[in-house]
C-alpha cells in the first residue's frame, strides 16, 4: 500500500507498536521492551460504524494489529492509526448480530486448529468451519489432533484414516498429547519462528499444549464436564505471547459459535478443495449438491472421492446451521 507524503511524516513522528492484548476499550501495545496500556483516538473509534451508523466491527482493533501511537507517559498511550493488515482471522459476531465482524487475530501467518479426540468429542463440523475461515483470511491452516492418549488402539486406525483425508487435501496434521514429549516436538516444529493463532472449542487443550511448550506462560486450564462434554472457558481474552523457541502465538478463548465471515456461502463448494474440480459437472447449472439428481458431488461421495464427514459439513453450512458447538 502506497502512502502520501503527509502519511509518511505522520508515521515518522509517532511510534509504532503491536497489539498483544485487547480488552473492551483498552489495548496493550508492545513497543521494543515497553508495554503500554492504550486507548483509541476518537477518530479511530468511529471506524466501528458505517456512514449510516450501522455497527461494522465488534472491535476495530485486534491482537496482532500494527498501530501508530502517541506515548503519554511510561504506562499509557493513545492509538492514532491502525496500519493495513496482511491477514485476519474473523468470525461473525456471536449472537444475533449477523452483520458484525469480530476480528480475532490480525497479521498471523497460520491458524492451528486444535481438536480433541475425546472430552470434548471430536467435532468435524467445527473443524471444517475453522478451515474455511482460515482460507477466507488468507492464512494457512494446520490441524492439531490432541488428547491422543485417550484413543483406544482399535479406534486409532479409523481416526488416522479420516485425517489422512485432510492431509490429502493439503492440510498438515499433527497428533499430540501432553503426556508424549515426541508429539509436543511435532507441534513445536509447526509453530517455531512463525506467528500462529491457536483456535478451538473450550476444553480441547489449547492452553495445556502451550503450557507444555513453554511452562512459564502459566495459562489457566480447565476440565471438561462429564455430563455436557464441553469445556469451561479458562482463557477469557485473546493474548499474544513471544515464544522462547522463536515466533509468536496468539491464544484464544474457546469458541462455541463459529459463524462464517467473509465467505461466499452461495458458492460454498469452492472452499472445499475436493469439490472444486467437480464444479460445473452436474446436470443442473444451479445445483446446490444436496437433493438434485445427476449431481457430480453427491456421486463423488457415493464413490468415496469426497469423504462423508466433509460432505456433511458442506450440507450443514449450506442449509444455514448456526455453527454452535
Image (cartoon, grey):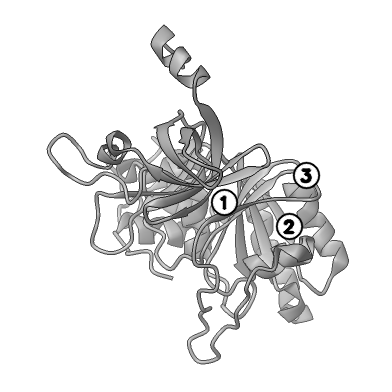
**Depicted 158 relative to depicted 267: above or below:** below
Q: Distance between the residues labelled 1 and 3?
A: 39 Å
Q: Name the residue under label 2.
A: 174
Residue 11 seen by the camera? yes
Image coordinates for residue 49, horizontal then vertical, percent: 22, 41
**Depicted 68 relative to depicted 194: above or below:** above
Do the numbered discs 2 and 1 sit on residues whose CB atoms are within 8 Å? no
Q: How far apart are marks 2 and 1 (CA)?
A: 23 Å
Q: If you read the primary sequence from the N terminus, does the residue marked by circle 1 or circle 3 appear first?
A: 3
Which label belongs to residue 246?
A: 3
**Label 2 residue SS:** strand
Which label belongs to residue 305?
A: 1
Image coordinates for residue 99, horizontal then vertical, percent: 24, 49
Of circles 2 and 1, the one toward us is: 2
**Depicted 186 relative to depicted 264: above or below:** below
**Label 3 residue SS:** loop
**Left/right of residue 325 with respect to residue 144 in the rendered view:** left
Amino acid at each position: 500500500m502506497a502512502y502520501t507524503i503527509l502519511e509518511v511524516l505522520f508515521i515518522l513522528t509517532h511510534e509504532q507498536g503491536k497489539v498483544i492484548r485487547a480488552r473492551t476499550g483498552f489495548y496493550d501495545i508492545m513497543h521494543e521492551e515497553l508495554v503500554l496500556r492504550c486507548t483509541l483516538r476518537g477518530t479511530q473509534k468511529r471506524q466501528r460504524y458505517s456512514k449510516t451508523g450501522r455497527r461494522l466491527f465488534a472491535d476495530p482493533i485486534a491482537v496482532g494489529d500494527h498501530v501508530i501511537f502517541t506515548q503519554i507517559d511510561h504506562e499509557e498511550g493513545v492509538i492514532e492509526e491502525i496500519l493495513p493488515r496482511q491477514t485476519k482471522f474473523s468470525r461473525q459476531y456471536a449472537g444475533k448480530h449477523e452483520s458484525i465482524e469480530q476480528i480475532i487475530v490480525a497479521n498471523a501467518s497460520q491458524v492451528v486448529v486444535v481438536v480433541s479426540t475425546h472430552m470434548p468429542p471430536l467435532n468435524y463440523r467445527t473443524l471444517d468451519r475453522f478451515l474455511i475461515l482460515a482460507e477466507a483470511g488468507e492464512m494457512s491452516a494446520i490441524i492439531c489432533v490432541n488428547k491422543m492418549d485417550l484413543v483406544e488402539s482399535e479406534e486409532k486406525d479409523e481416526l488416522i484414516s479420516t485425517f489422512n483425508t485432510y492431509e490429502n487435501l493439503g492440510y498438515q496434521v499433527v497428533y499430540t498429547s501432553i503426556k508424549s514429549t515426541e508429539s509436543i516436538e511435532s507441534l513445536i516444529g509447526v509453530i517455531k519462528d512463525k506467528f500462529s493463532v491457536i483456535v478451538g472449542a473450550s476444553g480441547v487443550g489449547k492452553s495445556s499444549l502451550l503450557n507444555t511448550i513453554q511452562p512459564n506462560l502459566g495459562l489457566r486450564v480447565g476440565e471438561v464436564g462429564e455430563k455436557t462434554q464441553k469445556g469451561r472457558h479458562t482463557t477469557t481474552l485473546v493474548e499474544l505471547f513471544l515464544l522462547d523457541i522463536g515466533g509468536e502465538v496468539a491464544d484464544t478463548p474457546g469458541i462455541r459459535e463459529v459463524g462464517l465471515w467473509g465467505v461466499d456461502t452461495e458458492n460454498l463448494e469452492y472452499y472445499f478443495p475436493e469439490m472444486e474440480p467437480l464444479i460445473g459437472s452436474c446436470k443442473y447449472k444451479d445445483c446446490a449438491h444436496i437433493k438434485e439428481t445427476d449431481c457430480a458431488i453427491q456421486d463423488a461421495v457415493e464413490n468415496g472421492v469426497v469423504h462423508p464427514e466433509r460432505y456433511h459439513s458442506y450440507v450443514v453450512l449450506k442449509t444455514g446451521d448456526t455453527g454452535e458447538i
